[in-house]
Amino acid sequence: MAEHRTMQRDALLDAARTLLSEGGTEALSFPALAERTGLARSSVYEYFRSRAAVVEELCAVDFPVWAAEVEAAMERVETPEAKIEAYVRQQLALVGDRRHRAVVAISAGELDAGAREKIRAAHGGLIAMIVEALGALGHKQPRLAAMLLQGVVDAAVRRIELGAAEDPTEITEAAVAMTLHGVRG
């Protein structure tokens, strides 16, 4: 029985990822989840109390995987500059991934305070990955520098997600140049 529930929950999360990545927030509804999984709509409520709960669970499941991929990319290189570059490139490479698209598809404003706090904590863990490299470069406030660096990454993510005029590769290169060389390019 527990295994069946786990399989159903996983199917619901996978359907939610697909709905969010294909149609954004509006596409994520309990009737759509039921249709995608073959469950009765009332059964979806047995697993999740709200859309926000679905997104919260997606973040709890997918964010650690995403963060591990960023961390692994950073571990493959040696210098602080290379770690920063890997941090930026890997996050931007994940933008097209369904897991990432689902997490960013719904705004934090639609989540309850507990869900927003979990997402903030997860982002804090991501930022913590880069603090040491920034400290090694001589930043007097490496945590602040890490938060600002993440702001560049977040802006690049938004440009890519919006389908900006620039190619995603151009956006990635500009974000890497900004983080490594500032406005001097």
Image (cartoon, rainbow, N blue to C red):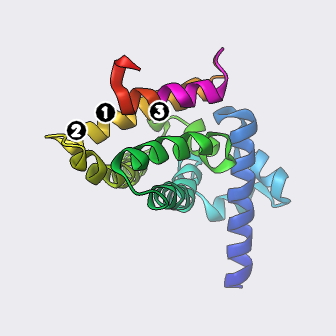
Q: Which element is circle 2 on?
A: helix
User: Magenta span has 175?
Assistant: yes
In this rendering, the answer to whether 56 lies above or below 184 is below
Q: Would residue 71 appear left or right of 136 to someone viewing this image? A: right
Density class for disc 1 (Cα within 10 Å; few <14, some 14-19, many ≥20) is some
Q: Residue at x 35, y 18 (%)?
A: 183
The image position of residue 132, as x and y in percent, is 27, 54
**Residue bearing the label numbered 1:** 148
Quadrant in the picture for residue 69: bottom right
SS at mark 1 in the image:
helix
Amino acid type, callout 3: Val
Earlier residue among tags 2 and 3: 2
Above or below, 43 against 113 in this view is: below
Q: Can you see residue 28?
A: no
Residue picked out by circle 3: 176
* Picture residue at 69% right of the left edge, 66% below the top: 10
What span is colored magenta in the figure?
Answer: 165-176
Q: Quadrant of the C terminus?
A: top left
- Mark 3 residue crowding within 10 angstroms, few (<14) / some (14–19) / many (20+): many
Say if mark 1 contacts mark 2, CB within 8 Å.
yes
On residue 144, which mark appears? 2
